[in-house]
Image (cartoon, rainbow, N blue to C red):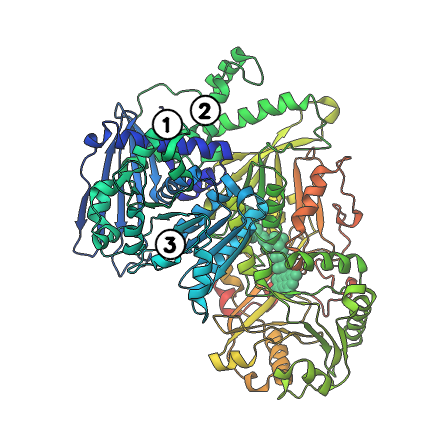
Amino acid sequence: MGNLLVLGDSEIHNIITNLSKAEIYTFRDVLARCLRDYSVGAEREYQPAPGVINRPEGQRCLFRPFTSSEGIGTKIIVQPPPTSKAGTALRGMVAMCDSDGVPSGILNAEEITTYRTSLIALIPYLWRRHTAKIVVFGAGKQALWHLRLALALRGDEIESIVVINRTASRAEELVVKLRGENDAKWKSAATMQHIDPSRPDFQEYLKSHLSAADAVFCTVASREPLFPASYIITEGRERQPYISAIGSWQPDMIELDPELLHQTVKRISPGSKAGSLLVDDRKYVLEHSGEAAQSKIGAEYLVEIGEMEKLEHDEGDNGPLHDWMKDGLLIYKSVGVGMTDLAASNAILDIARERGPSKASPIIGTSPEDNRPPTPPSYLTTPNDVLGRPDSLIVVWSRLKDENDNHFMKHSLRSEISGAHRNLAMSPVSKSDPIIIVGAGAFGLSTALHLAQAGYHDITVFDKGAGVPSDFSAANDVNKILRVEYDDDFYTNLSVEALKAWKTPLFAPHYHQTGFLHCTSGEAPKKAIDTLNSFRASAERHPDVRKCVVPLDNRDDIVRAAWQFQDGPLPGWKGYFNRYDGYAHSTNALKAVNEVCVASGVRFYLGDAGNVVEILYQASTKQSDAQSRKATGVKTRRNTTHNAALIIVAAGAAASSILPSLGTQVVAKSWSVAHIQLTDSEASALRGLPVTYARDLGFLFEPEHGTNLLKLCPMGGGFINTDPKTGVSHPPDTLGESQFMPAGDERRLRKLLAHTLPSLADRPFINKALCWFADTADSDYIVDYVPDTSNSVVLLSGDSGHGFKMFPIVGSWVKALLEAEDGEQEISRWRWKDPKMSRAGNWGEAVSWRVGSSEEFRDIRPAQSKAKL
Ligand SMILES: Cc1cc2nc3c(=O)[nH]c(=O)nc-3n(C[C@H](O)[C@H](O)[C@H](O)COP(=O)(O)OP(=O)(O)OC[C@H]3O[C@@H](n4cnc5c(N)ncnc54)[C@H](O)[C@@H]3O)c2cc1C
């Protein structure tokens, strides 16, 4: 077996979400064999009894040991004490050794348990003839995995999925997530919806769905039946359903109506005198399930899934038994068979080993001692290896120091072969080459999403933040304006395209089309008025946007467009209202895309493990190409190296710290933000408020749903942090240094409030911060190869403070660059450029939509924080 692998939840998640249909079937076979060995083989008698210990601190600890001819292990599940800061969800691990006692794996138990339970519940589902209509109870991980697997295995046969959950918003979230994943992966045409249990006609609705369902998956830890038997057993029902119930696992829990169980066993079904219920473990179901306790159905009516699998396996596809399995009313109750944890864990360890460290990383350690010689990974020992030069491979193996080297070698050797057939300078990567994206902000995540959707399947994203979104991301925010009008039609057209993408299932839940109220106050400078007019002109030039633009010539017009300003004096305010625009909840949008990326197999390294300190290069060996070097990977703050064929730097304001050649063409700049905490009634009075932007003062948004935070940003030239030695501006080293708002900005915001919402003008500001972005002289983005890197490094930067609206489409620009036939950025304004600034970072004058000049951070930071440093 070889090395001890340590797999965390995200690595396991990466593995199981990345399995192909054939691999899922193989996994299913492993579990089915395990159940057969348990039910009709001898394995049941070799399973030790589980133990439960309740500690005085309140923890409930379950120890579930298991053995098989292939391995021995134990699962530890802990229910934390009620006071736990980590929450009270069950957590735990599986510890494994091989049949000789050599430690083989330590795995986080959460994903494995969910996955094996769902996949076993889908074993009978795969016997079924029909699966057009699916109803799911629950909106947690089990529900998600049942549906993921159903879509992965039979997505083309499913017509509708209906999710029912006590909290309707969670069901809605599940549906949105599933739609996003389906769009990215399985492309089933199934409709997906949830039903809100609070609607008055809920029971009728439920009955109509259940009486037509082909499969019903119950995944709820419920204390009463989820639906009456009469919703299933209906007169003239055309097709009988398959019903699985895995959510309740204690005698006082129950999901299925006892009457439904009685009705089921009355029906003739093979394998017993009367009807049968399918279970995973007869004894455990009788002792631990509320269904058995309340229905008082005896052991003689229960058939184990392993017994049916044996029949299925031995007897093939014929007879009344198969008719029942395929078309009969089939109910499956599960409480879990410990041995299947062992089988699932072993299967995951095997896949992790097969895929090597890039797919199963991080492999945290290989001790305690494993006294065996290391086993070369299969890609180096397979006789028909792509190189066909096994002797040279053995030499390579003996030189490898660690798994990282090993992976690098694998990659380099593959590049060597494929390099003969393609020009690396033009198309730097194939879809199987490892790609690293530095930065999980708006640009990096969008890139991961688009590349994963296009079939690139070895993508790793690094971010120095502890989670997604990172605290360092400019997009880690409650809202961002999505406006389409620019004074430059190139960006207007792109924004229209982006807004269309905001209306697709993955992004739409985070888009709020409140409209954009764009004005200048009576004291605005001419530049601000000119910019407003050129924005309006561009909106009016666009055929789709034009219809949504309304002029606002005086206070009455403004209050008609936004009644919430009825108490605001709005002195001299004029402008226009554009219904086409709105805002996005940026944090939630980033999280949603992150989840789809993870589900699509993109790996994430976060915190210190994801903090990239350096790009590693290999000098060119060709004489003619002496200047050209090639990136081989990245080094992180933890001093670990990760190899890749292509590095995409999407590190926002911090890009120049890892790409010093950027020099001054990208300037780290910041604007300030502040918030006001509103009460529920104050927030209700501002619901639907358009994004309101006074070009000379600043802008504010509808309060955040849930927290009632009103966000405000002042208008101004921004703040830069220039290193006097290099002339390059960088964000300050720590986030704490940016937690304030300069006095001038605060004055402008108080004026904005006095003009619009005077009752809030003197309210305290909270969560004040400078937020750093990557500015360019002409406000154009940079999406290009970094010179002298043999097209092995791409820079994706220069968002210039207006990039978030492009979140759904940014990644498509990177894909286009990677797939460009001539290897060049087609859009000249997005190419690597020469610095054009007149004075470090002070580009306010060059771009029409900026008002005011930049100031140096050292001149505005509070005295106290200056003194500390
Ligand atoms: C105050 C403010 C208001 C804005 N308002 C709007 C708006 O209304 N509408 C709009 O469209 N846009 C707006 N923007 C701009 C928008 O936020 C940015 O365009 C967008 O976030 C840029 O995305 P990015 O991925 O390039 O950078 P970011 O989102 O900043 O992401 C960069 C990521 O790189 C990571 N990183 C940095 N260094 C490293 C490293 N060494 N190793 C690993 N990871 C690293 C960071 O942790 C971060 O997650 C605003 C920006 C600011 C500052």
Q: Which residue is mark 1?
A: 313
Asked if residue 721 can be seen in this view, the reply is: no
Element type at mark 1: helix
Ligand 1 contact, mark 2 (Cβ < 8 Å): no
Q: Position of residue 717 (x, y in %)?
A: 69, 67
Under circle 2, the secondary element is: loop
In this picture, residue 722 sits left or right of residue 528: left
Between the C-alphas of marks 1 and 2, the distance is 46 Å
Question: What residue lies at 63% left-to-right and 20% top-to-bottom?
Answer: 417
Q: CA distance from mark 3 to mark 1?
A: 30 Å
Q: Residues within 10 Å of mark 3 (few under 14, many from 20)?
A: some
Residue 420 can be seen in this image:
yes
| First-in-chain label (1 vs 2) | 1
x then y, percent, for residue 245: 34, 49
Q: In the image, what residue type sits under mark 1? A: His
Q: Would residue 824 appear left or right of 307 to someone viewing this image?
A: right
User: Closer to the observer: label 3 or label 1?
Assistant: 3
Q: Quadrant of residue 414?
A: top right
Q: Which mark is residue 233?
A: 3
